[in-house]
Amino acid sequence: MILRHVIPWTASSALAALLCSCADSPSAASRNPTPVPVTAASESYDYECDTPAGHFADWVRTLSATRVQVRGSLLMKEGRESANAPPVANVLLAGSEVAQSFGLHAQILSASPELLQIDLLGPLSGKAVVPVATVPWKNQPIEFELSLNAAGEAELSAAGHRAALRVGAITLTKFSLGCSTADAHFAHITVATD
């Protein structure tokens, strides 16, 4: 089963596509498909994010936590060509304001389309981007773990590499999986909160 929600790419949606989640957009229930639970007891999800060039899609789950750990794998199945929107996939955590969004940002490099750049994207207020790894992406699932600890440190482990960034104390209100101009598969996603 493929779950999709496709939104046309416009200049005003560029930020939303980067984050694949926006606090001022309609509620998650009204605009996002529900991912397929692998098993209800473990709260493990698979999400197929398949968008045409120049569009983005996301799935959002609400949270209420100050500490969280998200684990799973990301498989970029295809990057599409678009002059305005590079192929990306995101795993993001967010507070009640868009400026409190941070997480995994994976982008197929235009200069080396066989490579995927994985970054830890910091909150918008600081605009920090911490490189984590550059890896081949075709037919290669990338295991990741994204967490926020009680001290306000975000940590991303992906493709055998690790990066951390201080984001401060945030009460997390949502978690999202999304992509733009790509076909990406998120598998065995688990979310553990405090």
Image: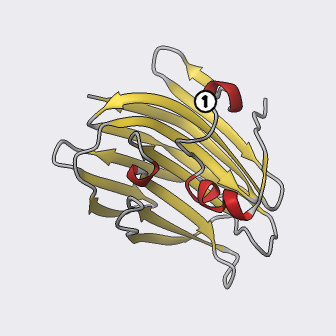
Farthest top residue?
Answer: 41
Q: Is residue 68 left or right of 141 when viewed as pictured?
A: left
Q: Is residue 80 above or below residue 192?
A: below
Q: Nearer the viewer, residue 30 or 134?
A: 30
Q: Quick check: can you spot residue 33?
A: no
**Position in image of residue 157 (x %, y %):** 37, 56
Q: Is residue 135 above or below residue 96?
A: below
Q: Is residue 108 above or below residue 177?
A: below
**Position in image of residue 183 (x %, y %):** 75, 52
Q: Amino acid at mark 1?
A: Ser
Q: Is residue 74 left or right of 157 when viewed as pictured?
A: right
**Position in image of residue 81 (x %, y %):** 82, 70
**Position in image of residue 104 (x %, y %):** 47, 56
- Image quadrant occupied by the C terminus: top left
- Say which residue appears at 83% left-offset and 55% top-offset: 52
Quadrant location of residue 122? bottom left
**Quick one: SS at disc 1?**
loop
Q: Mark 1 highlights which residue?
A: 27
Q: Is residue 24 left or right of 174 when viewed as pictured?
A: right
- Say which residue appears at 41% left-offset and 29% top-offset: 63
**Callout 1 environment at 10 Å: few (<14), some (14 to 19), or many (20+)?**
few
